[in-house]
Amino acid sequence: MSRTATRAARAIHQVARPDGMPTAEQFAFVDDELPPLTEGSALVENAYLSVDPYMLGSMEGDEGGWELNAPLEGRSVGRVVESRSAALPVGATVIHRQGWRTHAVVTRTDVRVLPDLPGVPLSAFLGVLGGTGLSAYVGLTRIARLAPGEDLFVSAAAGGVGTAAGQLARLLGARRVIGSAGSPAKTAFLTDQLGFDAAFDYHDGPVADLLTAAAPDGIDVYLDNVGGDHLAAAIGAMRDFGRIAWCGAIAQYTTEPPAAPHNLFELVGRSIRLEGFLVRNHMDAQEELYDLLAPHLRSGRVISPETVLDGFDRTVDAFLGVLTGANTGKMLVRL
């Protein structure tokens, strides 16, 4: 791609704070003129953008959140198309956090150069090999320490983290894997295509009753992406010395946080451990994840489920969709 062609870029800015669920009117598409490259920098043409539920907190202006009327932040994978950095040659494939735009000017410290994994699609580096897959891996191996023969419950199991967690649990030797999701189509996907032993639609009744029916003998580990009634149900179903890895809280992202689970004190009586975590504190596990999953992605034993919207103009649609459960697997935008 020529120097002239890559100088013009488009970006998305946030122009207003949300009050509850965000709307498309709180974003603006902006034509941008990229700065000239300086020594040590490179120009990346983004290929895929990731949108994730945590970005709602960034929209609300929490600590480290997004500034108004400025380029936004999010994971992206792309290729170097122009370079003044020996460490970032033209053609290198990288992952970085300058998403929500078509192009990014980066330095070596801004990116991670992706390994050459033949047979692995580029989009997987934002899915099962990306932040969502790494969240599932860290939650299961480092936080909950899932052991062979144990039973696992995953909430929001049809999302990016959940679909990765179910497949990882199988590789780690779980005895039974149970998931919750938001529609019959999603629960069928979990059991028919991802190998979950049981799955339920949380709209079908009290979550505690649905989980008891799916796991009548209880569970050992819970990977929580929801909070609220799902967390209370998992505590009720947990065996002695169970572990809960708390990854997300979709139930309260656009509403007032619920009261603490009514049965929280059961953690004491049954020696249950609950630990929250941020995947950014475990980036040293990234190579472990590549080594574990790449062979299984090539063989087809593991897949990287995705919902992909085509075109940069669909980025806001994709983000709003991931907040309402419009995705199965990882939500991505393909530029």
Image (cartoon, rainbow, N blue to C red):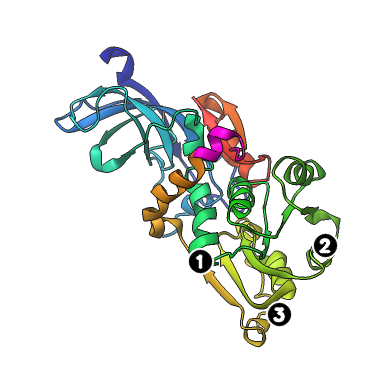
> Mark 3 or 1 closer to N-term?
1
Residue 279 percent across, percent down from the top left: 45, 56
What is the three-letter code of the residue carrying label 1?
Answer: Ile
| 100 vs 61, nearest the viewer | 100
| Residue 182, image x, y percentages | 75, 49
Q: Which residue is found at the position 51% from the left and 36% from the top?
A: 124
Identify the residue at image location x=31%, y=27%: 92
Q: Residues within 10 Å of mark 1 (few under 14, many from 20)?
A: some
296 is within the stretch colored magenta? yes
What's under tag 3, amino acid-wise?
A: Asn
Residue 255, placed above or below residue 157: below
Q: CA distance from mark 2 to mark 3?
A: 17 Å
Figure disc tally: 3
Which residue is identified by label 3?
Answer: 263
The residue under the point 73% across, 50% down is: 196
Q: Relative to 325, say whether 283 is above or below.
A: below
- The answer to whether residue 66 shows anywhere in this view is no
Callout 2: few (<14), some (14-19), or many (20+) C-alpha neighbours within 10 Å?
A: some
In the depicted view, which residue is nearer to us: 226 or 138? 138
Q: Quadrant of residue 222 in the image?
A: bottom right
Front of the two marks 1 and 2: 1
Q: Earlier in the sequence, mark 2 or mark 3?
A: 2
Residue located beneath label 1 in the image: 143
Residue range highlighted in magenta: 295-303
Residue 87 at x, y = what percent?
A: 21, 33
On the image, numbered disc 2 is attached to which residue?
Answer: 210
Image quarter of residue 188: top right
SS at mark 1?
helix
Image marks 1 and 2: residues in contact by CB distance under 8 Å:
no
> Marks 3 and 1, Cα distance to the nearest angstrom?
22 Å
User: Does residue 38 show up?
Assistant: yes
Relative placement, left or right, of 107 versus 25 is left
